[in-house]
Image: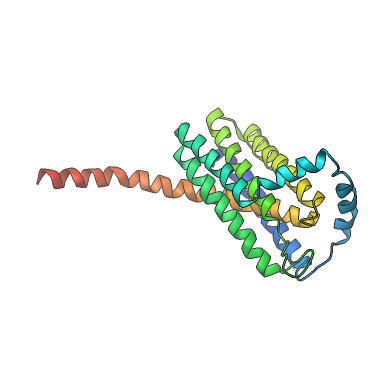
Amino acid sequence: MLPPSLRVGLGLTAALAALVVVVLGVLYAGHDEPGVVDRWIIQPTADSVRPPWRNAALATDFLGEPAGAATLVVAAVTGCLLLRRPRAAVLVVVGAGMTVGTTTLLKSLVGRTIHGDDNLSYPSGHTAFLTALALVVALLATGRLGLGRTAGTSLVLAAALAAGAAMGWAQVALGAHYPTDVLGGWCTALAVVPATAWLVDRLADRLADQMPDRMADAGRRERR
């Protein structure tokens, strides 16, 4: 799931993304108001959400809600299995789960809120989820198309940017998150998914290496 040609580039991207997540988390820990950069972006974005754009924002937001997210995951897993890519199916579930789990943990640690003390906002789980799913799909496409380092990295990052921008716009426009929350969610997915893909590959390769030995042992037992 993580082609060798992409490992260095995406590894560096993941490290940089993780650094951004940590820096923003430290800067906004315990805050309950938008920062300076947030204020520059919030009002123009909110002004853009008028019919029919509000409906588009609500539809995009739904993709990050439990029902919408579950539908996307089931569709993605089904597609991976139809294409006979079980590793990709595993990565859809594990990658999305790890990404959302990381954002949930970070929200508790950072403690940034919006619209009241009960609404933890950093990083955006909606943005992280959709970006993570886009990354997995792009990694699958890169492998199937046999893309090289430049083309493959460009496709993966472009997919992540498109998904993150769409969900990020919806979250800020609907007042669910600050822009820096969105950036944190996007970077969380960029940090978690490549590492998870590498881990899935390692575990799958190890299981594949062990299968011949297990089959040989089974054959010897049958002959006895």
Q: How far from the left and from the top, in percent, is residue 115?
A: 79, 64
Q: How far from the left and from the top, in percent, is residue 12?
A: 65, 49
Q: Where 99 falls versus 59 (above or below)?
A: below
Q: Residue at x 78, y 56 (%)?
A: 180
Q: Residue at x 77, y 56 (%)?
A: 177
The front one of 140 and 154 is: 140
Q: Is residue 209 shown to the viewer in this render?
A: yes
Which residue occupies the extreme left position in the image? 224
Write down the quadrant of residue 71 in the picture: top right
Relative horizontal placement of residue 179, taking residue 134 as reference (left or right): right
The front one of 221 and 41 is: 41
Q: Residue at x 85, y 57 (%)?
A: 38
Q: How far from the left and from the top, in percent, is residue 73?
A: 55, 44
Q: How far from the left and from the top, in percent, is residue 171?
A: 76, 51
Q: Where 91 falls versus 176 (above or below)?
A: above
Write down the quadrant of residue 32 in the picture: bottom right
Relative horizontal placement of residue 203, taking residue 48 as reference (left or right): left
Say how the picture is coloured: rainbow
Relative horizontal placement of residue 213, taking residue 75 as reference (left or right): left
Which residue occupies the extreme top position in the image? 145
- Number of numbered discs on residues: 0
Q: Is residue 16 shown to the viewer in this render?
A: no
Q: Residue at x 71, y 43 (%)?
A: 60
